[in-house]
Image (cartoon, rainbow, N blue to C red):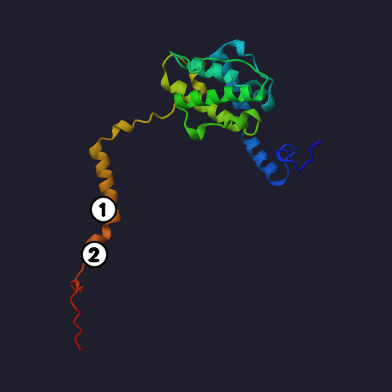
Amino acid sequence: MASQGAPGMANKGPAYGLSREVQGKIDKKYDPELEEKLIQWIVAQCGSGVGRPEPGKTGFQVWLKDGCVLSELINTLYPGDKPIKKIQTSPMAFKQMEQIAQFLNAAERYGVTKTDMFQTVDLWEGKDMAAVQRTLVALGSIAVTKDDGAYRGDPNWFHKKAQENRRDFSDDQLKEGKNVIGLQMGSNKGASQAGMTGYGRPRQIIN
């Protein structure tokens, strides 16, 4: 039997001290009310075929853990070609993680930013289910904002994302912005040089 000190075993036991404290803080960010809203949305979006999880964070994690429900969800948000061609349940860990990774890639293509993205282990090992919630909220917000007919459910479940219209700035305006900064940075250029002698000329010392 492997001793507790064997590589890879150390992180399997209960979390002590700091890591337990950190885990506790992460868990506190998990929102049970939000969980209910997200379940309602996923079922509305995918249909009752995805079932419903047991209430609570662990139930939510188990429901999403193999990546299949998430893959179904992201596929329903693409009106045309579906990003995930193959969705299949598998008891094998690496297959489940692969399925989650496919969801994450598709979600990023859909518009979820890297900062709103959970990591595969956050879900698969249940390390940070609050991060999973954050990703799903971001996804829902983008779906409501896109308003392309693919979103199903109550539009009030998610806030519309502020539309980023970077095109509003013309090149001239952007250049002007740079000039303003240039002037601020170089504002000592107007300092008077009176009293300084030209290079190479000895300063005259008058007794």
In the image, 25 versus 117, the foreground residue is: 117
Task: Return the residue at label 1.
Answer: 183
Q: Write the residue at 52% across / 31% down.
A: 117
In the image, 11 versus 15, the foreground residue is: 11
Task: Give the x, y percent position of residue 24.
Answer: 67, 39
Task: Give the x, y percent position of residue 109.
Answer: 45, 25
Badge 2: how crowded within 10 Å, few (<14), some, or many (20+)? few
Task: Give the x, y percent position of residue 170.
Answer: 25, 35
In the image, 83 versus 183, the foreground residue is: 83
Q: Amino acid at mark 2?
A: Ala
Q: Dividing the image into 4 quarters, which one contains the C terminus?
A: bottom left
Q: Quadrant of residue 194?
A: bottom left
Q: Amino acid at mark 1?
A: Leu
Mark 1–mark 2 Cα distance, whole angstroms, equals 13 Å
**69 in relation to 191, above or below:** above
Label 1 vs 2, first from the N-terminus? 1
- Which residue is farthest right? 1
Q: Quadrant of residue 40?
A: top right
Q: Write the residue at 25% across / 42% down.
A: 175
Q: Quadrant of residue 184?
A: bottom left
Q: Secondary structure at mark 1?
A: helix
Task: Return the residue at label 2.
Answer: 191
Badge 1: how crowded within 10 Å, few (<14), some, or many (20+)? few
Q: Secondary structure at mark 2?
A: loop
Task: Give the x, y percent position of residue 45.
Answer: 53, 15
In the image, 88 versus 129, the foreground residue is: 88
Q: Dividing the image into 4 quarters, which one contains the N terminus?
A: top right
Q: Write the residue at 55% across / 15% down.
A: 86
